[in-house]
Image (spheres, rainbow, N blue to C red):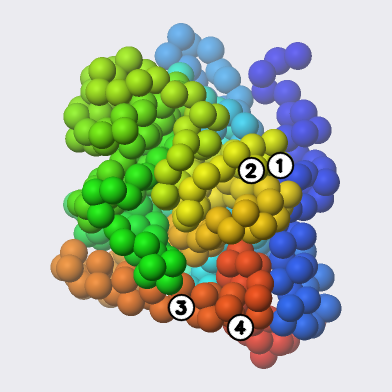
Amino acid sequence: MSESHVSDSVIVGWENHPFYSGVLGAMERAGRAIQIDRNVFNRLSKPKRVLYVSVPVRMDDGTIQVFDGFRVQHNTTLGPAKGGIRYHIDVNLAETSALAMLMTLKNSLVGLPLGGAKGGVRCDPNKLSRKEKQALTRRYTTEISMLLGPEKDIPAPDIGTDAQTMAWLMDTYSQQVGHAVPGVVTGKPIEIGGSLGRVDATGRGVVYTVIEASKRLRLDLNDKTRVAIQGFGNVGYHSAKILSDVGCSIVAVSDVSGGIYNTKGVAIEELRAYIAQNKTVKGFPGGDFVSNDELLELDVDILIPAALSGQITEKNADKIKCKILAEGANGPTSPEADAILFDKGVFTVPDILANSGGVIVSYFEWVQGLQKFFWSEKDVNNKLWEIISNAFNRVYDFHSGNKMDMRHSAIAVSLERLSKAMLYRGFFP
Ligand code: NAD
């Protein structure tokens, strides 16, 4: 079978996919807690719109390889669809749809005038040259451009994509319409309309929610506070850097190649410099090797999964020892693991709250682009703090008032706003 073959698992079966059905199940339980209108729930249980595209790319060796790409818009009641674009070998329609649903819930939770979307291309970005990655991005953008626009659908970076990818996307769209359109994408470089503070916003938001959680748990954040972080990309690195600035000790970090453990603290900037040279964490001399599985089970105060979904399941949940689990990644914990962690007394800051800093500052970037008026980094960070701590407090109040875990409380708070908005707007035709 050629690599361009679109297998059933890539394009169908999203209703039965464990990640999709996990998010849907959580939404159903949270919806019951707020007595959500059944028709509203039925509409939210499926994506509004799904686009499959094949993405042909001329590779450096002259052959043409055809990649599978998607853009899913889950809901657009509150505003234009918004969500990242992922380049990863496991991208499929079910996962992209579940991530789009999470984006709808996240944007509603933090009060943004945005709907939820997600996109991706099934590829290994580490195996693509810069030229191939640019060609893939430009062709993918062209194929999904019927959905895109500053008032329609606004992508952002996710796993395997970065500011350069967003610049190519912005340029491709702008070439099509004949003028520069910075508002079509967020997470761009500053020089073409990006926002100060966007690059570290997701990690910063994770840390702001950890600060709020530690106040509630009466846990001092100091050099005795041990932190482990899975994933050392955009979210993992910035969470590590900002938490160590706060004074915590980052005792373990990992990437796809495995992790480094040092009870005295891993030197974050030295590790970053090492990765710039050697591409991976593997072989870094400043600590002992730990596998990604072992990292999750370390005896730490704060655990931050900041890589892929499905990392904490019923197989390892019982061995998790942290006090605070702050979900930098989307969907790192399965529903079965959630229940086990709740019984163990682990305080979870769920993904739609913990990693919402990225989309909050993306929203700031979009607003600045539309107004052509740019803010200082201090203004961006202050406004981020205001929005995310306010959201944390609303979720925490629901959690303590209803004796419901933080994940379902976050979804319930989000659904309260979204369901009212859907009922006000009504149903067409
Ligand atoms: P990234 O591509 O910058 O980094 C991903 C990191 O995960 C890399 O260090 C990679 O080596 C590691 N990784 C990949 N596969 C792994 C595996 N099997 N085991 C352990 N580590 C692995 O991506 P990112 O932007 O930092 O995104 C990380 C997570 O955060 C994703 O779940 C993403 O959806 C979520 N997120 C990102 C943003 C954002 O603004 N970038 C916003 C919200 C949520």
Q: Secondary structure at mark 3?
A: helix
Disc 1 marks which residue?
314
Question: Dividing the image into 4 quarters, which one contains the N terminus?
Answer: top right
The secondary element bearing badge 2 is classed as: helix
Q: Earlier in the sequence, mark 1 or mark 4?
A: 1
Residue at figure coordinates x 41%, y 78% from the top left: 390
Gap between marks 3 and 1 measured at Cα: 29 Å
Looking at the picture, how far across and down is residue 360, in whole percent? 39, 66
Residue at image position (72%, 66%) is 27
> Element under label 1?
loop
Q: Position of residue 131 (x, y in %)?
A: 37, 24
Q: CA distance from mark 4 to mark 3?
A: 12 Å
| Cβ of mark 4 under 8 A from ligand 1 | no
Disc 3 residue: CB within 8 Å of ligand 1 = no
Q: Is residue 45 left or right of residue 194?
A: right
- Kindly report the distance in space between the C-alpha atoms of the residues bearing marks 1 and 4: 28 Å
Which numbered tag is attached to residue 401? 4
Contact (Cβ within 8 Å) of mark 1 with mark 2: yes
For label 2, count other residues whose C-alpha is less than 10 Å away and answer few (under 14), some (14-19) or many (20+).
many
Does label 4 or label 3 sit earlier along the sequence?
A: 3
Q: Which mark is residue 393?
A: 3
Q: Which labelled disc corresponds to residue 282? A: none
* On-image quarter of the C terminus: bottom right
Q: Look at the numbered discs 2 and 3 and tell me whether their residues touch, using CB distance below 8 Å.
A: no
At horizontal 61% and vertical 64% (from top left) the residue drawn is 407
Q: CA distance from mark 2 to mark 3?
A: 26 Å
